[in-house]
Amino acid sequence: MVARRTAWAKSQKFCWLCGATSDLQVHEISRGFARSKAVKEPACWVRCCPECHDLLADYSVWPIVRQCALKLDRNPQCYDLAAINRLRGRSARAITQKEVDAALATIEPVPAYLVDAFC
């Protein structure tokens, strides 16, 4: 599983929030008891720099539903809302797709220079 996570991280070339390209980390869409499972679940992985990692930990700014919207926008091939809900010990519909879709409006688009350079 470590190799899979490492390969995924290498494929994500920039911070999904600010566009930084160095010193990147992987944030998990989860915390507490579920974090140990989230480390192994691609649906929970978010690429970020250290500063944005701190922002993502603040649920008043980045609640789980908004983090799910970020995942859907930046990494749709690994997006799995049911897996995120299940991993967090919630029902499969604890966070709904409708809520995630509404949160997409709060997600800034990827800057064009990053799309051209890395996509």
Image: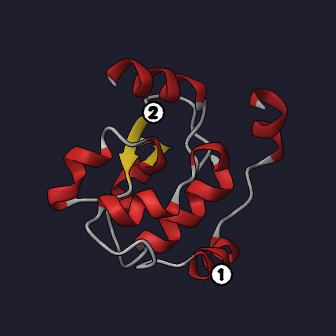
Q: Is residue 90 visible?
A: yes
Q: Secondary structure at mark 2?
A: loop
Q: Which residue does the image show at 43% across and 29% down from the upper left?
A: 23
User: Which of 98 and 15 lies nearest the eye of the viewer?
Assistant: 98
- In the picture, which quadrant includes the N terminus? top left
In this view, the residue farthest toward the left is 33
Could you say which is closer to the camera, residue 64 or residue 14?
64
Horizontal side of 100 relative to 43 (left or right) equals right
- The x, y position of residue 101, in whole percent, is 66, 75
Tell me what residue is drawn at x 45 percent, y 33 percent.
24
Rate crowding at label 1 as few (under 14), some (14 to 19) or many (20 or more) other CA atoms within 10 Å: few
Crowding at mark 2 (Cα within 10 Å: few <14, some 14-19, many 20+)? many
Splitting the image into 4 quarters, where does residue 59 fall? bottom left
Question: Image quadrant for the C terminus?
Answer: top right
Q: Is residue 49 left or right of residue 86?
A: right
State the separation of the CA atoms marked 2 and 1. 28 Å
- The spot of residue 76 in percent (x, y) is 66, 50
- Residue at numbered disc 2: 24
Q: In which quarter of the view is residue 115 placed?
A: top right
Q: Residue at x 38, y 43 (%)?
A: 41
- Image label count: 2
Mark 1 element type: helix
User: x and y percent of residue 98 in the render?
Assistant: 63, 81
Say which amino acid is labelled 2: Leu
User: What's the image's color scheme?
Assistant: secondary structure
Identified by mark 1, the residue type is: Ala
76 versus 3 height, above or below: below
The numbered disc on residue 102 is 1
